[in-house]
Image: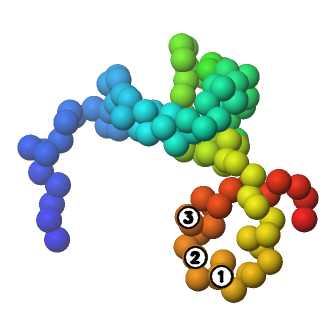
Amino acid sequence: MRRNSSRHWVSWVPFGFGYTKPHHYLKMARVAWENRDNLPYALRILRHGVCEDCALGTAGLKDWTIDGVHLCMVRLELMRLNTAPALDPSRLADVSSLSGMSSQKVRALGRLPEPM
């Protein structure tokens, strides 16, 4: 078992208090690329929607905890669930073809267009 060595530490300050969070520009660009087919709707969700995951009281691009713009990466990564195109219901006729797919591939088929 290796011991933590202080030479690997960024600072003596625990949990990075006082340091700026990393800028996730590459991840933000990837999310924009994934949602390029429905970008106006994605931007509307970001400007006026709420975050489904965090408890910071996020509404639009602001929250009640942090000053300035707040873009939670979890919120951005879940964006495709809201902007995905509708699934062709005929794909659900043969469930055996879906059982061999990974969850990512099934999710990539699209969202349910109507209640089932």
Is residue 29 visible in the rendered image? The answer is yes
Quarter of the figure with residue 90: bottom right
> What kind of residue is marked 3?
Gln
Where is residue 73 drawn, in percent x and y?
51, 38
- Residue kind at label 2, given as amino acid type: Met
Q: Residue at x 62, y 21 (%)?
A: 61
Q: Residues within 10 Å of mark 2 (few under 14, many from 20)?
A: few
Instruction: Name the residue at the right extreme.
Output: 115
Is disc 2 placed on a helix, strand or loop? loop
As helix, strand or loop, the secondary structure at mark 3 comes to: helix
> Residue drawn 75% across and 81% down?
94
> Cβ–Cβ below 8 Å for labels 2 and 1?
yes
- Mark sitting on residue 101: 2
Give the image location of residue 53, x and y in percent. 65, 43
Residue 97's tag is: 1
Sooner in the amino-acid sequence: mark 3 or mark 1: 1
Query: Which numbered tag is attached to residue 104?
Result: 3
Crowd around label 3: few <14 · some 14–19 · many ≥20 (10 Å): few
